[in-house]
Image: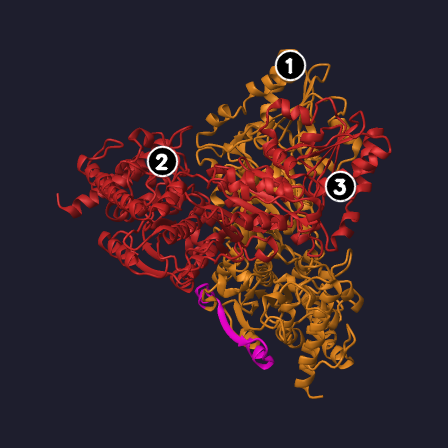
Chain colours: A red, B orange
Amino acid sequence: MTQPDLDQLCVNALRILAVEGVQKANSGHPGMPMGMADVAYTLWNRYLKANPSDPLWPNRDRFILSAGHGSMLLYSLLYLTGYPMTLEDLQHFRRFGSKTPGHPEYDPELGIETTTGPLGQGFANGVGMAIAAKHLAARFNKPGYPIFDHTIYAIVSDGEMMEGATHEAGSLAGHLGLDNLIYLYDDNEISIEGSTNLTFTEDVPARFRAYNWHVQEVDGHDLPAIARAIETAQDAAGRPHLIICHTHIAFGSPNLHDDAHAHGAPLGEEEIKLTKEALGWPYAESFFVPEQVLAQYRTLVVRGAEAQTAWDDMVARYTETFPEDSAELQRLLAGQLPANWADALPVFDPSDGPLATRAASGTVLNALAPVIPELIGGSADLEPSTKTFLKGYPAFQKDVPEGRNFHFGVRELGMGGLLNGMATYPGLRVYGATFMIFSDFMRPAVRLACLMKLPVTYVWTHDSIFVGEDGPTHEPVEQVMSLRLIPGMTVIRPADANETTAAWKVALLKKEGPLALSLTRQKLPIVTTPGAAADGVPRGGYVLSDSPLEAIDIILIATGSEVALALEAQTHLADDGIGARVISLPSWELFEAQPADYRESVLPKAIRVRLSVEAGVTIGWQRYVGLDGASIGVDRFGASAPYKVLAEAYGLTTANVVAKAKELLST
Amino acid sequence: MTQPDLDQLCVNALRILAVEGVQKANSGHPGMPMGMADVAYTLWNRYLKANPSDPLWPNRDRFILSAGHGSMLLYSLLYLTGYPMTLEDLQHFRRFGSKTPGHPEYDPELGIETTTGPLGQGFANGVGMAIAAKHLAARFNKPGYPIFDHTIYAIVSDGEMMEGATHEAGSLAGHLGLDNLIYLYDDNEISIEGSTNLTFTEDVPARFRAYNWHVQEVDGHDLPAIARAIETAQDAAGRPHLIICHTHIAFGSPNLHDDAHAHGAPLGEEEIKLTKEALGWPYAESFFVPEQVLAQYRTLVVRGAEAQTAWDDMVARYTETFPEDSAELQRLLAGQLPANWADALPVFDPSDGPLATRAASGTVLNALAPVIPELIGGSADLEPSTKTFLKGYPAFQKDVPEGRNFHFGVRELGMGGLLNGMATYPGLRVYGATFMIFSDFMRPAVRLACLMKLPVTYVWTHDSIFVGEDGPTHEPVEQVMSLRLIPGMTVIRPADANETTAAWKVALLKKEGPLALSLTRQKLPIVTTPGAAADGVPRGGYVLSDSPLEAIDIILIATGSEVALALEAQTHLADDGIGARVISLPSWELFEAQPADYRESVLPKAIRVRLSVEAGVTIGWQRYVGLDGASIGVDRFGASAPYKVLAEAYGLTTANVVAKAKELLST
């Protein structure tokens, strides 16, 4: 068999496996894998630098199936090239607990670099990965020692080109000149509702050129042309690469070729038979892979092992020549923080206040920056307000890849996707900042961080109606609570500067899952001691000030800026002979993870007179106050006014807390 | 005074008013109004077709300050041109209850066409307005009777060009060839963190040309050039228009000109003095408007009244010639539905089931389409799944503006912004559809619909983990609850086809505020009668099936697909001598709006043994079950598997409801 014939057999094997996997699951997306099989085979067979025997090799190329619905393409490639994926796994596509769910789920040990499905997110993740690779290269590479020199590949789709995230990430990638990014665009001109002509007639090549991308167009079924385009991209420095692959969805299917119906439904047994005939695939048996096909794909095992061995050797020489850099590299790859880093954490006393928690956060970040070099991040064009700039460090730019400050631009969703991609790299502790209100824009990416358990820290400032003059469009009301609803999210709303320090410590110690800091615009008094905060915040909730009287008549539960209110109310209530315990509850998730006896010690079941105070929606607080308690909050939109005026108008005052407490006690 | 001198004085009056308003409020954004004053004056003084004495005139041009932070520009224009806005209002900028909040808030009676501030949203709203104008023109214009022939103008900013919403809406506007759109881009090359060169170096003109926009570039301080560009845009048919205005932020300020610090902070009294000198503004007094300036601006009052009178005359002639069309037009302008429309609502009986509520919704929509011609909408590339296509009606396209079906493309956030713009028009009842999981992408626009009280209907299907095989990226868990948190939102999660019909009736009767339908992918039995559903759904919650035994031992509260589970559990519990009342609670918001005695009759305070069942997060349900009840839900991510497998794995089964009910009763 000639190599071209073998190549064609390999491509068709990929098509058929994908189609049969979908058929067996009786659900899935066969059209895309059939259309992109030529491109995927070419990339994986000839160019992808990765080691199926050690999928975690740090300098591997990253492959992202951004069009995640074509997951059978990826699973088939992983099986064929020798990753820990079996034919049986392919046959269990979309079954409960399988390695082959409907959309790829982040599992780098399996060769799955990110979770995809929501269109545009994989595209943005790849940009974040390219940034991470450039940054690590700048930190560790030395002349003759290209420790990090890999490429980020992705397959992206028509639908993604329509998504806003793609614009945001694409524009920034072009600005940053990320030439380690090679995206293969499956331009099949079909989306779910039919031809892309129904809604999508923009000139994509011109658009990406406008973003400063290097754009090529090829016939996506012409293997040599695909190969030439990839090589051209690899050689052209200074810009990210888009290779527009003109393809036919469901290529090979006589009746569904170029048809939107092939997008999201099995072909059917009969059409599979016809497709095999049309493709000249002689094997009637399902899930059959000819020996020579498997052998061809499995060349990656050898190629990858050789590449990694050469890299290991280089790292060994690097270790001899640059022992300090190497030790730092090994620390990062092991996911360890520097020794004694926590000693740098600042403490605050009342004379430091009043201080906005966003300002305290800026102090913490700048205290940690010198001792945690992997701490990097930035803001979506709000750093003067979010206080997230690391002073004295450069900004990451095309010519400054060592920069630790990021100007993400007014691109919140793109920032979210970039942060996820960056966080998949060992050796980066990333944060991203904007106003809490704009967490709404980031939500799809935040959810994926939760699903992927990525340790991203969100710095969301201006976290209540106390934004004040900017008015309701800028005043979060429902955001903090709605973030608590996302499985796997940890939200911390610190009461003052010391709780902010403690919150950052929790964030940096966290190995898995994102953490959101909900920080104030307005100044707050220092109401905790460093010790109480350091002890209490990791537990999520604690008795900040117990009843000054013999009895606990009422429990006041507050978070963030409202803790000071609760403390003031406690004093007033005591004057009237009412004993109030004040609980600071900065993190529901951390509190719920405590042992039952600890939670009982803070919030005794027997005391049902409970009042929560938080400047946000009250739905949800019934979890702690029940049907017998009450909640002070904000169940309507904010308004434009100085924040002290709003406090009165919205009842976020000591007087109202006292009044509500008395009302509760009198019923 | 020559006209050019007077024009310059008018422009500077606008600058100074804006700057003084910000100064008096001691907060706000002076830089943008100073930079765009020349453009704004030229547009409002020479071209804007609007009537300050009747801001609601249906055929007025729409002006959107998409860069909403420059709100003092808009407020100053409204005062100067004679809208119901006074100098005193300008002096109350950013005060509680004023007409002049920090960012413009939708108030068409005041001349404020949409709420802006979150960047990119006003841009998308304008595209929706342009669609609405084209559609109404197609419905009502006749040769010689251009009932609707107005233009949508907007001022957009650098920050917005970075936002994804702008990409989504811009690409679609180009596809649709919306030549009634003229956007003036304030290209001042400054954003909050500094020069746009830090993060934004894309070629905007090339990008918009790639979208099929007609692009011009002008010096934004050259009045005749601005005028020529606007006229060129008005005359060039077939494409939307972007006029890139090269401006200087804080134009006129000697020390803050071109400086990011002028973006979001008052200039200071001293700098205002210097600015007045630099601009040759001879008046030291604050908020002073020379008589001849006011006279010049107020020419809009005469021009607008004349234009409206001519239009009124045309409509009168139209009424004589086309009495039926005119009656229909008057009905729409009055915001009335056609007579007897509700007679078309379908009813279902058990033999029609099992039926997915998305399918029932499709049946309702198609039954209503012929009788409610203003019912229009579409899907973000998912209509085969969301069942939202109006069969037999064309799709809205450049050459088919009468189309009622919309192919929004894979542009969820853009769709949200477009729907808001469309909904500001009388005579359109709009809906937009996608999967519930992707409501996350739409959230910023949904929030604005709530804030603006726009009657948009969202059709969000595939509303739980019962999506099944597509897996956790496509399975909503926290979405339904998080939508309930947004002030002003109404969520309805119908239990079956009859509740779906009733929900659509509520949606169409709603005059203010958006409504979300949460619909299933999977089939559901018909468990309600048309009468019970029609009576119960508008109340939000009702006793669907009372305890079959003498006592009410437990209350089961369920929504949507879980209502059938609760009913089955009720039967099993009765067999074991336990009396369960089953409440269907499709809408929390509608239920909470009922009189207390009705709520008490459904959910008696005395019965504390309560169990909620909803396939979503349980945080929030404590509002109804308290600390003594329990909730069955989904507090982790979903998984990829056939949905019946997930039901078992996640405990969403009759057996588990029965077991949890017994457990509750035994404690």
**Does residue B511 show up?**
no
Q: Residue furthest top?
A: B576
Judging by the rendered image, the residue that carries numbered circle 3 is A565
- Type of the residue with mark 3: Leu
Q: Chain of mark 1?
A: B
- Type of the residue with mark 1: Ala
Q: Position of residue B219 (x, y in %)?
A: 55, 77
Judging by the rendered image, the residue that carries numbered circle 2 is A109
**Callout 1 secondary element:** helix
**Callout 3 secondary element:** helix
Query: Residue A471: which quarter of the image?
Result: bottom right
Please tell me if label 1 and label 3 are on a single chain.
Answer: no
Q: Chain of mark 2?
A: A
Q: Quadrant of the C terminus of chain B?
A: top right
Report the front residue among B231 and B537.
Answer: B231
Above/below status of B121 relative to B11:
above
Residue at 65% in and 50% down:
A462
Query: Residue B659: which quarter of the image?
Result: top right
Above/below status of A322 relative to A276:
below
Q: Residue furthest right?
A: A576
Report the front residue among B524 and B242.
Answer: B242
- Of tags 2 and 3, the one toward the viewer is 3
Rate crowding at label 3 as few (under 14), some (14 to 19) or many (20 or more) other CA atoms within 10 Å: many
Q: Chain of mark 3?
A: A
Q: Assess whether mark 3 and mark 1 are in contact (beta carbons under 8 angstroms).
A: no
Span shown in magenta: B206-229
How far apart in space, not on screen, are marks 1 and 3 (Cα)?
A: 50 Å
Judging by the rendered image, the residue that carries numbered circle 1 is B574
How far apart in space, not on screen, are marks 1 and 2 (Cα)?
A: 51 Å
Above/below status of B45 relative to A406:
below
Please tell me if label 1 and label 2 are on a single chain.
Answer: no
Does the magenta-highlighted stretch encompass residue B570? no
